Amino acid sequence: MKGISIVLVEDDIKFREAFVRIIGATTDLRLVGVAASGDEGLRLLAEQRPDVLLIDLGLPDRPGRDLISYAAQHLPDCDSMVITVFGDERHVIESIEAGATGYLLKDALPADFTEQIRQLHAGASPISPVIARQVLARSRRRGPLVPIRPKCIPCRSARRKFYLSPRRDSPTTRSRACCRYRPTR
């Protein structure tokens, strides 16, 4: 059976049953695992290797971002969509930094929730409007992206290139300038 395979990790039984019902009503989305805890979710991720992870952040045994991070590191073809009540900047940024590619608030789920899953799998990043506004506001506070020239201390490589840094005062750590790049402070 083809379709987009999904693992759902949600501890709230009401939401979990609603998501199971919504996803089950489609023909192109396959729910291959449902977990109520982080440990159970990790086991399902390793066993099922889904296309999409739908994850709540407030799990009873571990933060949801642990599962997002696991998926990002071990399942490169798996997209993680946060579905949570936490809309504060800390949770949003931590989730995105862990590897989340979508972020929807439970109290503002779109009517076309299954379409959001399809779009996520197709390469989009569904984000609740209030979350998008927070991310944009944070980006404006941090300043514009500026080109920087990282310096390769060990070999002074001539292969240095310009890289974008989110802030003027912090060089990027993802440089391909040379094999022994060390950021200068």
Image (cartoon, rainbow, N blue to C red):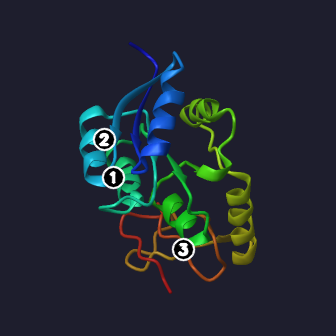
Q: Which residue is mark 3?
A: 150
Q: Up-down: is 2 above or below 122?
A: above
Amino acid at circle 3 = Pro
Q: Which residue is mark 1?
A: 70
Looking at the image, do the residues carrying marks 2 and 1 touch, with CB atoms under 8 Å apart?
A: yes
Name the spot of residue 77 as percent of width and height, x first: 42, 37
Is residue 145 in sight in this rendering? Answer: no
In the rendered image, the vertical position of residue 117 relative to residue 147, given as above or below: above
Could you give the CA–CA distance between mark 3 and mark 1, rounded to whole angstroms? 30 Å
Q: Reading the chain from its start, which is encountered first: label 2 or label 1?
A: 2
Percent coordinates x, y for residue 95 in the rendering:
50, 60
The N terminus lies in quadrant: top left
Q: Based on the displayed image, in which of its 4 quarters is residue 144 positioned? A: bottom right
Residue 156: give x, y in percent of width and height: 45, 75
**Mark 3 packing: few (<14 Cα in 10 Å), some, or many (20+)?**
many
Q: Residue at x 42, y 15 (%)?
A: 2
Q: What residue type is disc 1 on? A: Tyr
Per the image, the residue denoted by label 2 is 45
Three-letter code for the amino acid on which mark 2 is drawn: Leu
SS class of the residue under badge 3? loop
Left or right: residue 101 versus residue 71 is right
Disc nearest the viewer among 3 and 1? 1
